[in-house]
C-alpha cells in the first residue's frame, strides 16, 4: 500500500522530492522522480524483509525493533538481508561481541589477505592501541559476502590525503585507466560533496565526500573504517607496552552495550535514519551525518512508525 | 628586535640556523663598525650601506675572487660565519639564492643582504598540502617576492619555485621586468594559467628553460605555444609541459621545435598523440630528455597501415637518456623505444598501465638505467625483471595504480626483496604497496647500504607485517641502523613507539621524516626530537603525539625548517606554550574545513584546530595569513 503524500517525514522538501505516492500526484517540474523508489511501505517492501540475524550489525537490530520498515541494511543489500559491514570483505565482518557497528578489529582495514591480521588466531595487532594483543572477537556467524572484485568500485574511500598521492596522479589514473571507470571518480575538486560526519564520543569530526561513494554499502564501510580508530582510541592505554596477552577489558567497557546507528540531517534540518531513500536522493539531501548511539536514535523510528500509522 | 637577534646568536649551545645567524652577524657587524669609527661619518646614511675603508680591503678583494667559485650553499653558509668580512664578501659573491621557506625571511631582507643574485629558488607550502590536508588559500604567494626581485635584481636570469602560488600577473611581471630572464621552473605550483605562460613565451626573448613540473595550470583557450616568436632561431633548451591539462597548438609547437636547435629537453602533455610525437622527434633528434605525451593515437584515428616508423624515429635520437610520458599508452607501441633503451639512464613509466610481460620487453634492454619510475601494474614479477637487468639502479619509485587502502596489491615484499638483491647501488626508493614484511625491509637495509632515501608507503593504515603479524618496527629499525647515509625517511604500517626509538637512536643523519598513523604515545615523538640532531623537516599526521611530546623539541625547533602535525593530540595551550618559549618561531594553527574538524562539543571550540605548522622566521607573523590560520603568540 502506498503512503499518503504528506507523510514525508524523511523531511525531503517537496520541491526536491517527489510525493511519496506512487501514482496519485503528477511529477512536479519535470524532475525525474523516482516515485517507486521512495514509496514507503509497511511490511514487506517488495523484497524480503531483513532477517533478524543476531550476529549481524546493530543497525539492523535497531530497525527490527521499529518494525518492518525497509531499512538501511535492506537498501544496502538489495534485500538480501545480509548486513555487510566490511564492504571489502572476503573477511567476515568482525562485529565484536556487541554487534557493534564499529568493530574492534582495528583500523587496519578489512582488506583481504594481509589486511585481515585481526582475523587470525594470533595476536590481533589491528591498531597501535591494541598492540597489547587484543584479539577482536570473531563474529559468530561469518557472513558469506562475496569479495568485491577489483573491477567493482570497491568501497573504501578514504581518509583525506591518504595514501599520499597527488591529485594530479590520481586524476590521471582514474581518467585513463583501461577499466575506464566513471570518470567522476577520480576528479577531486569538481563536484565534491563534502559533509561532516560526527560520531558520538569521538573527539574529531570527519568530512567525507559523498560523491566518492556509489552506494550505502560503500559509505557505511568507509565510515566504519574511519571511525573505528576512534572507538579504539578511546581505550588507548599509554602505559601498556607489552604485546602479549589479551587485554580486552577496557575495550569491552567501551563497547558493551553501546551500539551506533547512522543518521543524517537533511535539507530541512530533520534527522533521519540513513537508508530510507535511494542513494542519489540521499546524497542530494544529506547535509551532515551523525553516528549516534542507538539509545538516542530510538526516538526516530517509532515516531516514524506513528506517523505512518496515523496516515493510514 | 635587534636585541633579540643578538641574544639569539649568543645562545650558542643551540646554534641558530646558519642562514639566520649569518644575517645577525651582517646586521650587527655594520652597526659595530659605525660605533667604532664614530668620526662623524654617519651622516644619516643607512648603516648597512655605509662602507668605511678598512684595512682588510685587499684581503676582501682576494676573498671575493676566491669565494665566487664556491657553489654549494651549505659551504657558503659556513663561510659566511667565519667573520664579518667573510660574511660580507660571501654575500657579495652569492649568485644563487635559495629560500627554503618563503616565510622565514622577507624579500626585503634577503635582497638587502645579497646584492648580486642571478638565480633564485623559493619554496613555499609544506609538502602535506599536496594531499589536500590544508585549505588551498594558505599562502606562499610569489607576488611580494617578484616585486622585490624586480627592484633588487634587474639582471635576474633564473627563477625556481616549488609549491608557491604564482599568478598570471606574476608571470607577466617576470616577463616584462627582467630582460635577461632565461629560466623558469615551476614545481608543484598553482595559481596561474596559460595566459601567464603566453606572456612568458612572448616576451622572454632569452628564454632557455620553461619547465612546468607537476603544477596545476588553469585551463583557458589561450594558445601560449603560439606566442613564442614566430621567426628566427630560439635559444630554447628545455620545454617541459607534461602537467598542462589542456590541448596545445601542435602546429605552433612543431614550428617552434624546428626553430630550436638547442632544444634538449622536451616533455609533451597528453594531448600530443603518438603521430604528432613522431613529427616532433624527426625534427629534434638531438633530444636528450623526451616526454612522449599520450603515446597513443589521436582520438578518431584508427590503427592503420599508414603509420610512421616510430622505431626509426627513436633510433635516430642517439642522445636520448631520459624517457617519460606514456600518459595514455597503447602498449603495442612500446616496442618503438627498444632502440634507445640501452642508453637510457632514466625511464618514467609511472603513468603507463602496463603489465609484467610488457615491461619485460623493455626493461631487459635497460642496462644503464639509474632512475626508474613505474606503476605497480607491473607486479612483483616486473620488479624482479628490473632487478635482474638494472644493476646500476639508483632511484626507484613504484606508484599505485589504484591508490586506495584496500585495493589489490600487485606489488609486495617479494618485489622489494628482489630489488634489494638485484640493485645493490640503490640510493632512493619510494614504494607503495598493500602488504609488506619486516624481513624484506631488513633485507633491503642489508643489501643496499647506500640508501639515502627510504620511503615506504603501506597503504593500509596500521597494517602489520602480513606474515608475522608483528609491527613494522624492526624493518624500519634496520633501515635506520644499517643505512648509514640515510637522510630521508617515510614510515608506514603498524608502528609502535619502538620504531621511533630506533629512529632516534640510529637516524643521526635523518633530515626529513614523514610519519602517518603511527606510534603509541608521546614517547614516539620524543625519541625523534631528542635523538635526531639533523632533523629539519618533520611532517606527522594522525598519530597520538601530544603537548608533552611537542615540548620535548624546544631545544631543536630553531634548527628545523618546519614541523607539521595534523590530527594529533595537540591542544591550543600546548602550542601556545611553544610559541611563547620560542619567539622566533611562527606557530600557525590551521583549521581545515575539508578534512578533520574538532567535534563541536569540545571545550576549546573557539581555538580548535586541525593542523599545527610551525617554522622559524626572522620576520614574525606573516601578514597574509587567511582567516583559517591563527598565529599563536
Image (cartoon, coloured by chain):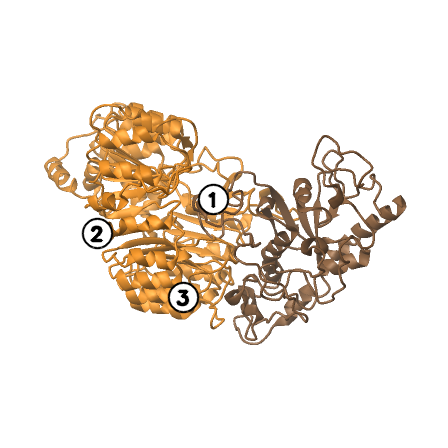
> Residue B73, image x and y in percent?
24, 45
Q: Cα distance, mark 1 to mark 2?
A: 32 Å
Residue at image point 73% right, 48% down: A276
Confirm or deny contact between disc 1 and disc 2 (CB under 8 A). Answer: no
Q: Is mark 1 on a helix, strand or loop?
A: helix
Q: Which residue corresponds to mark 2? A: B343
Q: Name the residue under label 3.
A: B413
The answer to whether residue B505 of the structure is visible from this angle is no
- Residue at x 43%, y 54% (from the top left corner): B400
In which image quadrant can residue A13 be found? top right
Which chain's residue wears label 2?
Answer: B
Which chain does the residue under circle 3 lie in? B
Dot 1 corresponds to which residue? A175
- The answer to whether marks 2 and 3 sit on the same chain is yes
Q: Please, which chain is the residue tagged with disc 1 on?
A: A
Q: Nearer the viewer, mark 1 or mark 3?
A: 1
Q: Is residue B70 left or right of residue A38?
A: left
Colour of chain A in the rendered structure image? brown
x%, y% of residue B454? Answer: 36, 59
Camera-nearest residue between B355 and B549: B355
Amino acid at each position: 500500500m502506498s503512503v499518503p503524500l504528506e507523510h514525508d517525514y524523511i523531511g525531503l522538501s517537496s520541491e526536491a522530492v517527489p510525493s511519496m505516492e506512487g501514482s496519485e500526484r503528477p511529477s512536479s517540474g519535470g524532475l525525474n522522480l523516482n516515485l517507486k523508489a521512495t514509496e514507503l511501505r509497511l511490511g514487506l517492501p517488495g523484497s524480503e524483509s531483513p532477517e533478524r540475524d543476531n550476529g549481524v550489525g546493530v543497525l539492523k537490530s535497531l530497525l527490527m525493533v521499529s518494525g518492518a520498515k525497509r531499512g538501511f541494511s535492506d537498501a544496502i543489500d538489495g534485500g538480501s538481508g545480509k548486513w555487510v559491514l566490511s564492504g571489502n570483505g572476503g573477511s567476515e565482518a568482525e562485529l565484536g561481541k556487541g554487534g557493534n557497528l564499529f568493530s574492534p578489529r582495528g583500523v587496519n582495514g578489512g582488506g583481504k589477505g594481509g589486511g585481515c591480521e585481526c582475523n587470525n588466531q594470533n595476536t590481533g595487532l589491528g591498531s597501535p592501541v591494541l598492540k597489547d594483543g587484543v584479539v577482536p572477537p570473531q563474529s559468530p556467524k561469518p557472513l558469506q559476502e562475496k569479495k568485491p572484485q577489483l573491477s567493482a568500485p570497491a568501497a573504501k574511500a578514504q581518509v583525506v590525503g591518504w595514501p599520499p598521492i597527488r591529485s594530479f596522479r590520481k586524476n590521471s589514473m582514474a581518467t585513463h585507466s583501461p577499466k575506464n571507470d566513471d570518470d567522476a571518480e577520480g576528479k577531486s575538486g569538481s563536484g565534491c560533496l563534502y559533509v561532516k560526519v560526527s560520531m558520538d564520543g569521538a573527539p574529531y569530526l570527519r568530512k567525507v565526500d559523498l560523491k566518492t561513494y556509489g552506494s550505502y554499502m560503500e559509505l557505511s564501510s568507509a565510515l566504519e573504517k574511519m571511525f573505528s580508530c576512534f572507538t579504539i582510541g578511546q581505550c588507548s592505554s599509554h602505559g601498556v607496552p607489552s604485546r602479549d596477552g589479551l587485554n580486552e577489558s577496557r575495550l569491552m567497557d567501551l563497547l558493551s552495550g553501546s551500539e551506533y546507528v547512522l543518521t543524517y540531517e537533511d535539507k530541512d534540518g530533520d534527522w533521519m535514519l540513513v537508508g530510507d531513500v535511494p542513494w542519489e536522493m540521499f546524497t542530494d539531501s544529506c547535509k551532515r551525518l551523525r553516528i549516534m548511539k542507538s539509545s538516542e536514535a530510538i526516538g526516530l523510528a517509532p515516531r516514524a512508525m506513528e506517523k505512518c500509522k496515523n496516515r493510514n | 628586535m635587534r636585541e633579540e637577534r643578538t641574544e639569539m646568536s649568543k645562545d650558542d649551545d643551540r646554534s641558530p640556523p646558519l642562514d639566520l645567524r649569518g644575517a645577525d652577524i651582517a646586521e650587527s657587524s655594520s652597526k659595530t663598525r659605525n660605533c667604532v669609527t664614530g668620526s662623524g661619518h654617519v651622516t644619516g646614511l643607512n648603516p648597512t650601506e655605509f662602507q668605511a675603508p678598512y684595512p682588510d680591503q685587499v684581503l676582501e678583494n682576494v676573498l671575493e675572487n676566491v669565494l665566487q667559485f664556491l657553489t654549494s650553499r651549505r659551504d657558503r653558509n659556513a663561510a659566511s660565519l667565519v667573520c664579518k668580512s667573510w660574511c660580507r664578501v660571501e654575500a657579495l659573491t652569492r649568485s644563487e639564492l635559495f629560500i627554503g621557506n618563503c616565510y622565514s625571511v622577507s624579500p626585503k631582507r634577503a635582497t638587502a643582504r645579497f646584492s648580486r643574485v642571478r638565480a633564485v629558488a623559493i619554496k613555499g607550502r609544506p609538502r602535506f598540502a599536496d594531499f589536500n590536508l590544508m585549505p588551498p588559500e594558505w599562502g606562499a604567494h610569489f607576488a611580494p617576492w617578484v616585486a622585490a626581485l624586480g627592484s633588487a635584481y634587474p639582471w635576474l636570469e633564473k627563477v625556481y619555485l616549488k609549491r608557491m602560488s604564482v599568478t598570471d600577473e606574476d608571470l607577466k611581471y617576470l616577463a616584462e621586468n627582467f630582460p635577461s630572464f632565461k629560466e623558469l621552473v615551476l614545481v608543484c605550483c598553482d595559481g596561474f594559467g596559460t595566459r601567464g605562460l603566453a606572456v612568458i613565451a612572448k616576451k622572454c626573448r632569452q628564454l632557455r628553460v620553461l619547465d612546468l613540473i607537476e603544477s596545476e595550470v588553469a585551463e583557458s583557450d589561450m594558445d601560449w605555444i603560439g606566442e613564442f616568436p614566430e621567426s628566427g632561431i630560439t635559444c630554447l633548451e628545455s620545454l617541459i609541459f607534461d602537467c598542462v591539462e589542456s590541448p596545445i597548438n601542435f602546429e605552433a609547437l612543431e614550428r617552434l621545435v624546428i626553430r630550436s636547435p638547442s632544444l634538449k629537453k622536451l616533455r609533451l602533455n597528453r594531448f600530443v598523440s603518438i603521430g604528432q610525437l613522431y613529427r616532433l622527434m624527426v625534427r629534434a633528434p638531438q633530444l636528450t630528455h623526451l616526454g612522449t605525451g599520450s603515446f597513443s593515437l589521436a582520438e578518431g584515428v584508427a590503427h592503420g597501415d599508414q603509420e610512421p616508423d616510430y622505431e626509426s624515429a627513436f633510433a635516430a635520437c642517439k642522445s636520448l637518456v631520459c624517457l617519460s610520458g606514456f600518459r595514455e599508452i597503447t602498449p603495442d607501441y612500446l616496442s618503438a623505444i627498444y632502440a634507445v633503451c640501452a642508453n637510457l639512464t632514466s625511464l618514467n613509466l609511472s603513468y603507463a598501465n602496463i603489465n609484467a610481460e610488457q615491461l619485460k620487453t623493455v626493461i631487459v634492454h635497460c642496462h644503464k638505467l639509474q632512475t626508474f619510475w613505474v606503476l605497480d601494474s607491473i607486479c612483483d614479477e616486473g620488479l624482479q625483471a628490473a632487478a635482474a637487468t638494472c644493476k646500476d639502479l639508483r632511484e626507484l619509485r613504484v606508484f599505485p595504480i589504484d591508490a586506495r587502502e584496500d585495493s589489490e596489491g600487485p606489488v609486495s615484499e617479494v618485489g622489494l626483496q628482489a630489488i634489494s638483491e638485484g640493485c645493490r647501488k640503490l640510493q632512493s626508493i619510494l614504494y607503495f604497496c598493500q602488504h609488506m614484511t619486516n624481513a624484506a625491509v631488513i633485507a633491503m637495509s642489508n643489501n643496499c647500504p647506500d640508501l639515502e632515501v627510504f620511503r615506504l608507503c603501506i597503504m593500509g593504515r596500521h597494517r602489520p607485517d602480513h606474515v608475522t603479524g608483528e609491527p613494522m618496527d624492526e624493518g624500519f629499525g634496520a633501515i635506520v641502523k644499517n643505512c648509514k647515509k640515510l637522510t630521508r625517511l617515510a614510515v608506514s604500517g603498524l608502528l609502535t613507539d619502538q620504531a621511533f626509538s630506533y629512529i632516534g637512536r640510529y637516524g643521526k643523519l635523518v633530515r626529513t621524516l614523514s610519519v602517518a598513523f603511527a606510534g603509541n604515545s608521546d614517547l614516539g615523538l620524543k625519541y625523534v626530537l631528542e635523538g635526531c640532531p639533523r632533523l629539519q623537516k618533520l611532517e606527522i599526521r594522525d598519530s597520538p603525539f601530544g603537548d608533552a611530546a611537542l615540548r620535548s623539541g624546544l631545544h631543536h625547533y630553531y634548527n628545523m625548517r618546519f614541523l607539521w602535525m595534523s590530527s594529533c593530540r595537540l591542544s591550543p595551550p600546548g602550542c601556545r606554550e611553544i610559541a611563547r618559549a620560542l619567539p622566533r618561531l611562527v606557530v600557525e594553527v590551521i583549521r581545515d574545513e575539508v578534512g578533520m574538524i574538532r567535534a563541536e562539543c569540545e571545550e576549546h571550540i573557539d581555538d580548535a584546530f586541525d593542523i599545527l605548522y610551525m617554522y622559524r622566521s626572522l620576520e614574525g607573523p606573516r601578514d597574509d595569513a587567511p582567516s583559517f590560520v591563527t598565529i599563536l603568540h
